[in-house]
Image: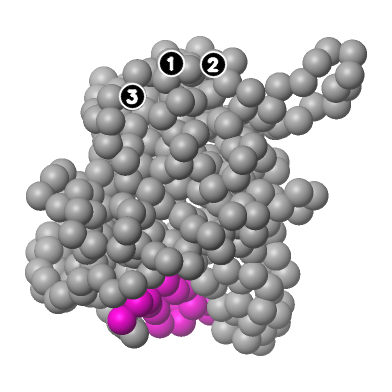
Amino acid sequence: MRVVGLLVLSLLAWISPMYAEVTMENVEYGGWANCVRLSNGTMELIATTDVGPRIIRCGFVGGENLFLESTDQLGKTGGEDWRIYGGHRLWHAPEMKPRTYAPDNEPVKLGWDGERLILTQPREEWTAVQKEIEVRMAEDRDGARVLHRITNKNLWPIRLSPWAITVFRGGGFAVLPRAVYGKHGENLLPTQNLSLWPYTNMADPRFTWGDRFIRVRTDAESKDPQKIGILNTRGWGAYVLGNEAFLKQIEYEKGAPYPDLNSSTEVYTQGMMLELETLGPLTEVEPGQSVEWIEHWTLLKGDIAEDDSSIESFFAPHLLTKEATPK
């Protein structure tokens, strides 16, 4: 099995003391009768097993859900139409219809060993792959390690990229870090790409092209979709909503091929929703083999001004690698 997404430099120090017992209970949520709730006392995640794999809620206990809930679809199951539902999901790239939009409307298998919550989808009828999401929640910080696994159930190899998509409710802005600055005359080659879609409008006011960060805002009045992608050498992105922030971190694999003109992190927004997406390297997956992709989530509180210096000082203490913030 090829495993991608291991934050080698500082992961062991980050995870070794943290995966003690957390609370897991069966709950009803959003019209689905069979959901599970993980909590460390201050942060909670809720996943439904009636469809998926999906994590439908993420927030502080007693607080608002940072994830979008598609209210007209909550509680629905079955059928051949793909539904966004909201929350966090696992896809595989490059995006293509109908393959990418295989519906995840059937029940998933639940596993729990006291540390790991594992949500396993049946073999997808359209694609013959099996998707799985494995969650470990931290006890001593408001965060989680989320592993995404895609297994090839075909009789032949397939080439894909694991694609982890988190859908946030509107009212906030996403943050993407730019690459490290260098000096003209000494640094002669480009260090970061920017991928644009046919509908991307770089003049759209939802974009801010800062010197250290790119910011993408939601806007209820802006119905036209916008999307960008970057090769994220810094390995992190975030969504800020009021005085709360969701930070996700990944490993950048230097030299690996990524989909979408070499993009490992993407942002899509339309109206009052925003998707913060990460993608693993394109991988040839043999029959019966799997590819894995890991995100590290951290939930934060604090006053976060929408300028580069404030963003840098707010997120820097929580990054897993020393060079994860532009200088």
Q: Position of residue 143 (x, y in %)?
A: 36, 54
Query: Which residue is under mark 1?
Result: 307
**Is the C-beta separation of discs 2 and 1 under 8 Å?**
yes
Secondary element under disc 1, as helix, strand or loop, is loop
Whether residue 70 is in magenta: the answer is: no
Magenta-colored span: 114-134
Choose between 212 and 121: the one closer to the eye.
212
Please identify, in this view, whether the residue under mark 3 or under mark 2 is nearer the observer.
3
**Residue type for callout 2:** Gly
Q: Which comes before the other along the chain, label 2 or label 1?
A: 2
Choose between 218 and 47: the one closer to the eye.
47
Q: Measured along the vertical axis of the image, is residue 90 above or below residue 195?
A: below
Whether residue 126 is in magenta: the answer is: yes
Query: Which residue is under mark 2?
Result: 210
Q: Identify the residue at image location x=58%, y=21%.
A: 212
Per the rendering, the mark at residue 304 is: 3
Q: Measured along the vertical axis of the image, is residue 91 above or below residue 149?
A: above
